[in-house]
Amino acid sequence: MKTQKYVLVGLFIFASGLGIFGQDIAYFFGDVWGWMDPLMVLLIVTIVSILLYLIYIYRSLFLYVKRGISDGRTLFVIFIGIFFAVVISFWSLFVLVMWWG
């Protein structure tokens, strides 16, 4: 049970890093791979970040509902995670739309 919680925390941190630093990642891989457009890299990073957030939300709600993890902080942590996931996903989409022009 604790291992799944640690995996969820790691997944959330990784998705947040991709969402916040997606533009820097796109510039980096655009410089490293001259054949790939940074806009495509940003699109891939944004989609992966949003998918990881969706996996996080699904798994955390699954642990809460099906497994019966119901200590006092669990639901609060899930809602805080969903809030940050929505905010960071909107930020990633905003940056992607601004790159498209």
Image (cartoon, grey):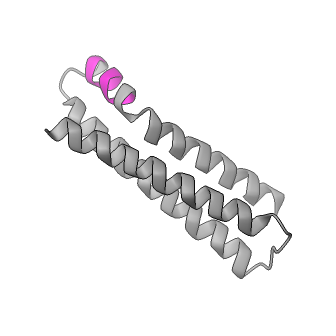
Which of 84/7 is in front?
84
Up-down: is 100 above or below 67?
above
Q: How many marks?
A: 0
Residue at the spot x=60%, y=49% of the render?
11
Is 7 positioned to the left or the right of 36 in the image? right
Magenta segment, prevailing SS (helix, strand or loop): helix
Q: Which residues are magenta?
A: 25-31
Picture coordinates of residue 71 (x, y %)? 86, 70
Residue at the spot x=53%, y=62% of the render?
55
Is 16 positioned to the left or the right of 45 in the image? right
Is 29 positioned to the left or the right of 36 in the image? right
Which of 2/57 is in front?
57
Q: Is residue 2 magenta?
A: no
Picture coordinates of residue 52 (x, y %)? 50, 54
Picture coordinates of residue 17 (x, y %)? 52, 37
Residue furthest right in the image: 71
Query: In the picture, residue 2 is in which quadrant?
Result: bottom right
Residue at the spot x=52%, y=46% of the render?
15
Is 51 positioned to the left or the right of 67 in the image? left
Picture coordinates of residue 69 (x, y %)? 81, 73
In the rendered image, the quadrant that contains the N terminus is bottom right
Up-down: is 61 above or below 49?
below
